[in-house]
Image (cartoon, grey):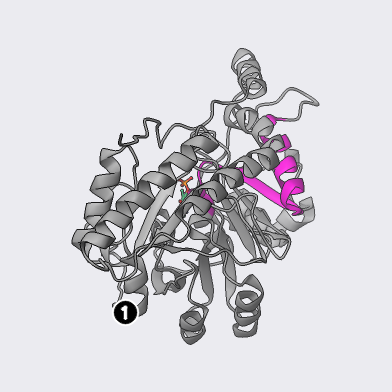
């Protein structure tokens, strides 16, 4: 009998009951705008910012309308200028180069290693081309952050971290988003907490955060924030900074606060599922596991494996066979962008030259989401299906 998987790769956990209750309370009082409070009332948004700041150990936090908005706001707040180069990962998702393009700046792509992190040797050679690095921790893979920060500090390059896939992760115990000048996070449905849309910025830098708060559309109401720099920091910034509205609202904040309180538990559940999949896939002929460094605290909300040097036809064959058995895999190597996958050379608004070693890696990346609605048995079954289909194609082609 051929086993099939019948679950959904896009079904997340429901919103916790405490979040539903808090959302209903906001709906009943009607004060959804973050600055619409009664005397003495602390808004859900201000409380969420305070709680997220504490969670990552940052003095300052701003909640905003999306992760992409957080990244564009970070770029503006560090002073990026139109036409300026911004270094970023070749292996990432479209909102990352999009955030750079949204401020009129120009992405300069840096290669990817077989560990699926930014190629630090390639970065070293490109550090003289830009003042800013938008570092994407794509699919949760953290590079050697100690080496990266030492290189960027020495070159005077400001690092902004895209932590859309690393909320809850850490390098050498330092939470993702706390090494660079700004950490940006997403609270969109497919990330680690779910408010439909939403995001955060965190920083230690008072001026950057004051600018970000003004940019987000705080008018002169920033005094009601609970994770903002002191009022004096806004003295000139409040006159000099344009309002580019993108605030978080109290309804989303109410949904997020109980999820943030549960995040450590959820991260542990993701990792149980991730390591069950990894165990089931290990030692499959032709398939390379992406090994995780011991310095990395992971959140396994998705898993990748490599089919290195396989032909496109054989990779497509694996995807089709797995899909026929209910397993929805994505291939980052497809020449045409499909669903959320695309390659640096499909972002034609940004100039790029081919990077041979990175192209070999990108052509091999197979990706799968790991929703928490999967059981551990589901993960074992999915791994059996992938193992069987990869092995069948590999053997039929005597080495794919
Ligand atoms: C989702 C995502 C973002 C942006 O988040 P949104 O909240 O959807 O704007 C940024 N970077 C990566 C790698 C993402 O996957």
Magenta stretch holds residue 45: yes
Locate residue 268: give its quadrant. Answer: top right
- Can you give x and y, in whole percent of width and height, for residue 112 in the image? 43, 71
Task: Mark yes or no: residue 335 visible.
Answer: no
Which residue is located at x 35 percent, y 41 percent? 327
Query: Is residue 394 or residue 343 the one in the foreground?
Result: 394
Which residue is located at x 31 percent, y 68 percent? 350
Identify whether 315 is placed above or below 357: above
From this viewpoint, which residue is outermost toward the top?
28
Which residue is located at x 60 percent, y 78 percent? 152
Query: Is residue 209 or residue 284 the one in the foreground?
Result: 284
Q: Please provide the residue range marked out in magenta.
A: 43-70
- Can you give x and y, in whole percent of width and height, for residue 386 in the image? 36, 49
- Ligand 1 neighbours mark 1 (CB distance < 8 Å): no
Query: Is residue 131 or residue 136 the one in the foreground?
Result: 136
User: Which residue bears the numbered disc 1?
Assistant: 356
- Can you give x and y, in whole percent of width and height, for residue 275 in the image? 56, 50
- Can you give x and y, in whole percent of width and height, for residue 28 in the image? 62, 13
Identify whether 321 is placed above or below 141: above
From this viewpoint, which residue is outermost toward the left?
313
From this viewpoint, which residue is outermost toward the front?
1
SS class of the residue under badge 1?
helix
Q: How crowded is mark 1: few (under 14 residues within 10 Å), some or many (20 or more)?
A: few
Q: Quadrant of the N terminus?
A: top left
Q: Main secondary structure of the magenta part?
A: helix
């Amino acid at each position: 009998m051929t086993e099939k998987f019948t679950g959904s790769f896009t079904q997340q956990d429901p919103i916790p009951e405490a979040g539903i209750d808090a959302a209903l309370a906001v709906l009943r009082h009607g004060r959804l705008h973050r600055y619409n409070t009664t005397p003495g009332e602390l808004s859900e948004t201000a409380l969420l910012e305070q709680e997220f700041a504490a969670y990552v150990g940052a003095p300052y936090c701003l909640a905003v309308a999306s992760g992409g908005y957080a990244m564009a706001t970070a770029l503006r707040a560090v002073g990026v200028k139109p036409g300026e180069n911004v270094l970023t990962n070749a292996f990432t998702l479209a909102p990352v180069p999009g955030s750079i393009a949204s401020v009129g700046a120009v992405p300069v792509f840096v290669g990817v290693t077989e560990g699926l992190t930014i190629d630090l040797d390639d970065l070293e050679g490109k550090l003289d081309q830009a003042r800013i690095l938008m570092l994407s921790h794509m699919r949760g893979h953290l590079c050697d952050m100690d080496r990266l920060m030492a290189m960027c500090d020495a070159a005077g390059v400001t690092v902004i971290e895209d932590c859309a896939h690393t909320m809850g992760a850490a390098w050498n115990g330092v939470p993702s988003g706390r090494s660079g000048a700004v950490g940006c996070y997403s609270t969109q449905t497919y990330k680690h907490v779910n408010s439909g849309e939403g995001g955060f910025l965190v920083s230690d830098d008072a001026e950057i955060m004051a600018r970000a708060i003004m940019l987000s559309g705080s008018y002169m109401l920033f005094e009601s924030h609970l994770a903002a720099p002191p009022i004096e920091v806004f003295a000139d910034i409040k006159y000099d900074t344009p309002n580019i509205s993108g605030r978080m609202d109290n309804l989303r904040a109410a949904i997020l606060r109980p999820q943030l309180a549960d995040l450590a538990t959820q991260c542990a559940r993701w990792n149980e599922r991730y390591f069950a999949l990894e165990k089931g896939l290990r030692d499959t002929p032709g398939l390379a596991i992406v090994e995780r460094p011991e310095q990395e605290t992971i959140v396994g909300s998705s898993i990748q494996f490599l089919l290195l040097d396989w032909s496109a036809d054989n990779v497509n064959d694996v995807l089709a066979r797995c899909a026929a058995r209910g397993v929805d895999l994505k291939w980052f190597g497809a020449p045409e962008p499909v669903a959320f996958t695309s390659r640096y050379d499909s972002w034609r608004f940004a100039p790029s030259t081919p990077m041979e070693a990175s192209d070999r890696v990108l052509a091999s990346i197979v990706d799968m989401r790991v929703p928490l609605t999967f059981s551990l048995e589901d993960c074992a079954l999915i791994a059996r299906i992938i193992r069987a289909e990869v092995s069948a194609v590999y053997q039929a082609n005597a080495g794919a």
